[in-house]
Image (cartoon, helix red, strand yellow):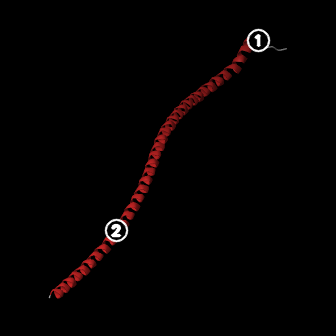
Amino acid sequence: MNHPTAKQQLIGERKVTFPNLFRMEKHTGHMEKHTDNLDEATYNLEKYTDDLDESAYNMEIVTGQLDSSAYGIDNSAHELDSFAYELDNSTDELDNSTDELENYRGQMDKHWRDMVALRRKTGRDRGQMEMRRKLMDS
């Protein structure tokens, strides 16, 4: 059997080991670069996630403000509806009062015409009575 000497074995190992070590170091360097890139990407992703979380929080605040504004607008709309209903009722009451005043005016006009007619009739009656008295006195 042919066994290599220790020197030959060492040289043989170097031939095999050194190139493998060099390749391993080269791959390790590449892997470290990839790890650094992944670390940077992870950092950026965490930063973007934090930014998104902050944006979501701000959106919740704005949504709350919009909900509050919508609630206020809705209440104002209900108040306006209530006011419009009261205004309609007041308008109806005013129309009824106007109708009553027109009826009263019509009654007053009728009473006035009756009074004028009665005065005319009374005046004629007086004139006739005076003529009768004069005729009787003479």
Q: Residues within 10 Å of mark 1 (few under 14, many from 20)?
A: few
The one of 99 and 57 positioned closer to us in this rendering: 99
Which residue lies at the image location 23% right of the left edge and 83% below the top edge? 124
Q: Amino acid at mark 1?
A: Thr
> Which residue in the protein does label 1 denote?
5
Number of numbered markers: 2
> Dot 1 lies on which element?
loop
State the image coordinates of residue 34 (x, y, percent, origin top left). Answer: 59, 29
CA gap between label 1 and label 2 equals 142 Å
Q: Is residue 127 above or below residue 62?
A: below
Which residue lies at the image location 58% right of the left edge and 28% below the top edge? 33
Residue 40 lies left or right of residue 23; in this view the side is: left
Q: Residue 115 has which mark?
A: none
Quarter of the image for residue 31 reads top right
> Which residue in the protein does label 2 denote?
104
Q: Nearer the viewer, mark 1 or mark 2?
A: 2
Q: Amino acid at mark 2?
A: Tyr
State the image coordinates of residue 108 (x, y, percent, origin top left). Answer: 31, 71
The one of 48 and 8 positioned closer to us in this rendering: 48
Q: Is residue 96 above or below residue 49?
A: below
